[in-house]
Image (spheres, rainbow, N blue to C red):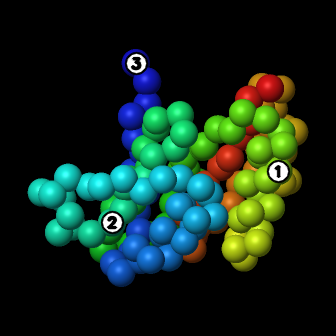
Amino acid sequence: MRLHHVQVSIPPGGEAEARRFYAEALGLAEIPKPAALTARGGVWLRGAGGAEVHLGVEEPFVPAAKAHPALAVDTTEELEAVAERLAGYGFAPDWSQRHNTETFERFHVLDPFGNRVEVVHPL
């Protein structure tokens, strides 16, 4: 079994901000939603490894402060480059837990809506 996608909630009308964060700053590729689901709003994206992040409109919206997707990169250099790109877009990576596990290094960042996102490099 493998992970196909994770659902992250966004507020109504948040698609443009979501694209800026998830596609432009994080580097995920937007993929088309099935025609039957487009009226619901939201955005679907896919990472290089094939796992998808589905951003779904939810009202009332409440950001996920603890639950979060963790997106993996292949190298320390890539981890640092993603953090630098996010910072360039105005999103502040939190490195406070970078080395608190023996199996990966990481940072956390909040999307424009306050949802927690983790980026990891398995060691």
In percent of width and height, residue 9 lies at 40, 62
Q: Is residue 10 left or right of residue 75?
A: left
**What's the mark number on residue 42?**
2
The residues bearing labels 3 and 1 have C-alpha atoms spaced at a distance of: 30 Å
- The disc, 2 or 3, on the residue closer to the chain's N-terminal end is 3
Mark 1 touches mark 2? (CB < 8 Å): no
In percent of width and height, residue 120 lies at 71, 40
Above-or-below relation of 2 to 67: above
- Please tell me which residue is depicted at 77% across the width and 46% down the height of the picture: 79
- Please tell me which residue is depicted at 63% across the width and 64% down the height of the picture: 25
Q: Element type at marker 2?
A: loop
Q: Name the amino acid, label 1.
A: Glu
Q: Name the amino acid, label 2.
A: Gly
**What's the mark number on residue 80?**
1
Choose top left, top right, bottom left or bottom right for residue 35. Answer: bottom left
Q: In this rendering, does residue 97 appear at all?
A: no
Q: Element type at marker 1?
A: helix
Q: Quadrant of the N terminus?
A: top left
Above-or-below relation of 48 to 58: above
The residues bearing labels 1 and 2 have C-alpha atoms spaced at a distance of: 28 Å
> Callout 3 environment at 10 Å: few (<14), some (14 to 19), or many (20+)?
few
Say which of 32 and 87 sits in front. Answer: 32
Q: Element type at marker 3?
A: loop
Q: In this rendering, does residue 21 appear at all?
A: yes
Q: Is residue 44 left or right of residue 69?
A: left
**What's the mark number on residue 1?**
3
The residues bearing labels 2 and 3 have C-alpha atoms spaced at a distance of: 26 Å
Q: Is residue 110 left or right of residue 3?
A: right
- Please tell me which residue is depicted at 60% across the width and 43% down the height of the picture: 71
Say which of 83 and 60 sits in front. Answer: 83
Q: Name the amino acid, label 3.
A: Met
In percent of width and height, residue 94 lies at 79, 59
